[in-house]
Amino acid sequence: MPPLLTPVPVGTFVLLMLAMELKHYAADFVLQTNWMARGKDCIGGWHKPLAAHAGLHGLATLGLALLVAPALWWLGLVDFVVHGSIDRAKALASQHLQLPVTDARFWWLMGFDQLLHQITNVFLVAMLALA
């Protein structure tokens, strides 16, 4: 891993962040089917929908890595595991708390989920930018 103080051109970082943000939007909202969205939050039978959803993220990150730094192809696997773990943790918290969408805490949980995804995206972009 390169030292943290390695300079990275701001333009490179911004373009990679934009690409990662578009990837996240597409995989988390546009391409996520109803089966994925509802299934990954179920008490049982959540494995396949969650794997499909996290797989979208992993494949898109793999594609970006192959374009920018092919040696970092494994970042697609990292994104798959981390995204799936964050989403599963959110599902378990939701099941435990049983918060309706009218409860502000439901939206706090949703926002925290998205915050964790964005932190992940910054890490992934930093790895790609430093390659």
Image (spheres, grey):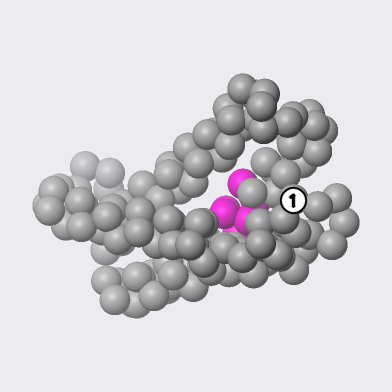
Residue 53, position as x, y percentages in the image = 61, 64
Residue most extreme to the top = 104
The answer to which of 64 and 37 lies nearer the viewer is 37
The answer to which of 81 and 117 lies nearer the viewer is 117
Residue on which disc 1 sits? 41
Residue most extreme to the front = 102
Residue 14, position as x, y percentages in the image = 20, 51
In the figure, residue 67 lies in which quadrant? Answer: bottom left
Q: In this view, does 25 lie above or below 58?
A: above
Residue range (magenta):
81-86
Residue drawn at point x = 57 percent, y = 53 percent: 82
Q: In this view, does 22 lie above or below 103?
A: below
Instruction: State yes or no: residue 97 in magenta.
Output: no
Label the magenta part by its dominant secondary structure: helix
Circle 1 sits in a helix, a strand or a loop, which is it?
loop
In the figure, residue 112 lies in which quadrant? Answer: top right
Left/right placement of residue 54 relative to residue 89 reads: left
The answer to which of 3 and 77 lies nearer the viewer is 77
Q: Is residue 22 above or below residue 114?
A: below
Residue 130, position as x, y percentages in the image = 25, 57
Left/right placement of residue 93 relative to residue 57 reads: right
Residue drawn at point x = 52 percent, y = 34 percent: 111
**Quadrant of the snapshot with the C terminus:** bottom left
Q: Which amino acid does label 1 sit on?
A: Asp
Residue 83, position as x, y percentages in the image = 57, 54
Residue drawn at point x = 75 percent, y = 59 percent: 39
Q: In this view, does 57 lie above or below 71?
A: above
**Quadrant of the snapshot with the N terminus:** bottom left
The answer to which of 62 and 69 lies nearer the viewer is 62
In the figure, residue 97 lies in which quadrant? Answer: top right
Residue drawn at point x = 80 percent, y = 38 percent: 95
Label 1: how many Cα within 10 Å (few below 14, some 14–19, many 20+): many
